[in-house]
Amino acid sequence: MEDNVAARVGFAAMSADKRRDIASKGGKTAHLKGTAHEWTADQAREAGRKGGTAAHRRSRETAAAPKHEHGVGGDAERERR
């Protein structure tokens, strides 16, 4: 490939604004058709709980990971951030 930008096709070739515009139209159409998912308070609460649990599990796993030869992972990785 001579140019990374030239290799992009479809949505990847579009500007972020163009992609956002298309996504917005799709969401609006789904709501008009009545096929869009609308979260109840309980569904949103449960999704947030699951996301928080997963995020905390990943951070605990990272902290418990053995340190590598170059100091990547575990406490060394967290200190660098």
Image: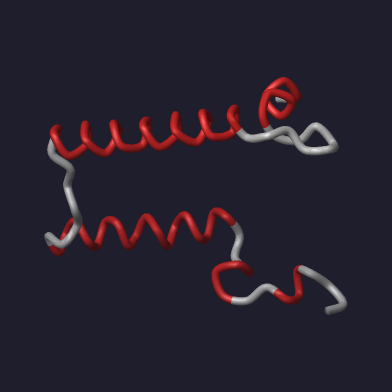
Percent of width and height locating residue 76? 74, 25
State the quadrant of the N terminus.
Answer: bottom right
Residue under the point 17% across and 39% down:
43
Residue farthest along the top direction in this orientation: 79
Percent of width and height locating residue 71? 80, 32
Could you say which quadrant of the image residue 52 lies in? top left
Decide which of 29, 61 is in the foreground and name it.
61
Image color mode: secondary structure
Residue under the point 62% across and 35% down:
65
Query: Is 27 located above or below residue 9 in the figure?
Result: above
Residue under the point 57% across and 55% down:
16
Left/right of residue 42 with respect to residue 13 in the rendered view: left
Left/right of residue 76 with respect to residue 23 in the rendered view: right
Left/right of residue 30 with respect to residue 78 in the rendered view: left
Percent of width and height locating residue 69? 83, 38
State the quadrant of the C terminus.
Answer: top right
Residue farthest along the bottom direction in this orientation: 1
Query: Is 49 located above or below residue 33 in the figure?
Result: above
Residue under the point 44% across and 33% down:
57
Q: How many marks?
A: 0
